[in-house]
């Protein structure tokens, strides 16, 4: 176990100064999305941005501890870093074991999911339902911290069901702050655990960005990230005037090319000059490597389907990939063929 005194010292010095692994917490991150943010998606986005913090899909403790192939859930390419593993679970001992394993695997952050509203995870005491059990979350947090030097972060909603967005959220955050958590990423909506699907829970409950802003103003020593309903980097810049970090999910899935401007617009770095065609061609050696490792082509084309959104030839590009990527014998050359459907020079 990681020495408790050392852990508390790290929490008090690192988090109170808004630091993360010895540096400022990343101002922009990719949201964890089930069946989306796999290693292929993250690798492609890393070609577009050196600064973005990548989040894995949520991985349950059961998949890591009892699954037939736990390495499949933990493996990533070194190029993907910085990368955070999001864990789903509510058993402190299991979460501690997974945190220890993830630390050895080389992750940069471990995040506990306290925000997913689906029935499936609720039945296993995972996700947003944990907002009704702050004592349990505190126990999980401290068990995880005791096994690692890495930051343990919380991703949650601003409340669930009939909870008060002010009083209950404040009590929840304050208890976890006292337990040693210094970094919270908040989806700025409530989650309704009965009556709404996961998709509806991303769209129906009203956004309340002001509540997240107030949380940061009330706790300036905490690192506060915001998520939910954010679609452009201009919106990100506006949020960053109030909070420390912004997380985008579906907007990136629909249009991955957004990430190509993150380093310039969010971090003030010079424009890379990378074109869409160049980025995809840089991805091809990775595709060939993963095919040799036994991966299928079909999942590896999914990060590319939205790259040419609004560009002439984009529909034919997507159709060629979608119709043929599952066929036996297809490889990286299919992606090169599909690129021929889109002119190298175009205006959007």
Image: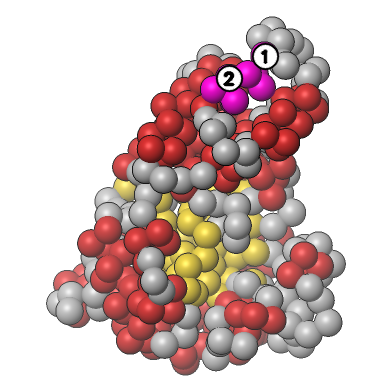
Q: Residue at x 53, y 17 (%)?
A: 278
Which SS class for mark 2?
helix
Q: Which residue is mark 1?
A: 340
Could you say where residue 7 lies in the image, as x and y percent from the top left?
Answer: 22, 73
Task: Give 99 or 313, whichever is nearer the viewer.
Answer: 313
Q: CA distance from mark 2 to mark 1?
A: 7 Å
Q: Image check: 210 left or right of 180?
A: right
Could you say where residue 275 lies in the image, as x and y percent from the top left?
Answer: 58, 17
Could you say where residue 333 lies in the image, as x and y percent from the top left?
Answer: 54, 22
Q: Which mark is residue 336?
A: 2
Q: Residue at x 44, y 38 (%)?
A: 291
Residue that sits furthest to the front in the current view: 328
**Residue 281 seen in this snapshot:** yes
Which contiguous range is marked in magenta?
333-340
Q: Quadrant of residue 260?
A: top right
Q: Is residue 336 magenta?
A: yes
Quadrant location, the N terminus: bottom left
């Amino acid at each position: 176990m990681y020495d408790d005194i050392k852990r508390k010292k790290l929490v008090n010095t690192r988090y109170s100064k808004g630091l993360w692994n010895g540096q400022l917490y990343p101002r922009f991150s990719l949201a964890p999305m089930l069946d989306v943010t796999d290693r292929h998606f993250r690798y492609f986005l890393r070609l577009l941005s050196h600064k973005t913090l990548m989040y894995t899909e949520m991985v349950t403790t059961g998949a890591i501890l009892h699954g037939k192939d736990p390495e499949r859930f933990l493996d990533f390419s070194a190029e993907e870093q910085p990368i955070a593993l999001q864990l789903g679970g509510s058993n402190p001992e299991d979460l501690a074991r997974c945190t220890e394993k993830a630390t050895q695997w080389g992750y940069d952050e471990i995040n506990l999911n306290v925000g997913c509203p689906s029935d499936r995870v609720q039945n296993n005491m995972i996700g947003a339902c944990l907002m009704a059990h702050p004592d349990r979350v505190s126990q999980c947090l401290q068990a995880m911290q005791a096994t690692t030097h890495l930051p343990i972060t919380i991703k949650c909603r601003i409340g669930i069901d009939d909870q008060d967005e002010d009083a209950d959220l404040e009590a929840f955050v304050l208890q976890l702050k006292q337990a040693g958590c210094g970094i919270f990423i908040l989806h700025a909506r409530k989650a309704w655990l009965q009556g709404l699907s996961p998709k509806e829970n991303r769209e129906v409950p009203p956004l309340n960005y002001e509540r997240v802003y107030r949380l940061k103003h009330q706790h300036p020593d905490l690192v506060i990230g915001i998520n939910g309903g954010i679609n452009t980097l201009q919106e990100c810049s506006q949020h960053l005037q109030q909070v420390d970090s912004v997380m985008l999910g579906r907007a990136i899935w629909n249009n991955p090319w957004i990430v190509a401007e993150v380093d310039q617009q969010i971090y003030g770095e010079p424009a890379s000059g990378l074109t869409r065609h160049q980025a995809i061609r840089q991805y091809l050696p990775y595709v060939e490597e993963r095919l040799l490792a036994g991966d299928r082509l079909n999942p590896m084309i999914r990060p590319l389907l939205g790259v040419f959104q609004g560009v002439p030839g984009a529909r034919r590009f997507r159709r060629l990939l979608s119709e043929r990527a599952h066929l036996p014998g297809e490889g990286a050359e299919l992606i090169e063929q599909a690129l021929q459907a889109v002119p190298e020079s175009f205006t959007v």
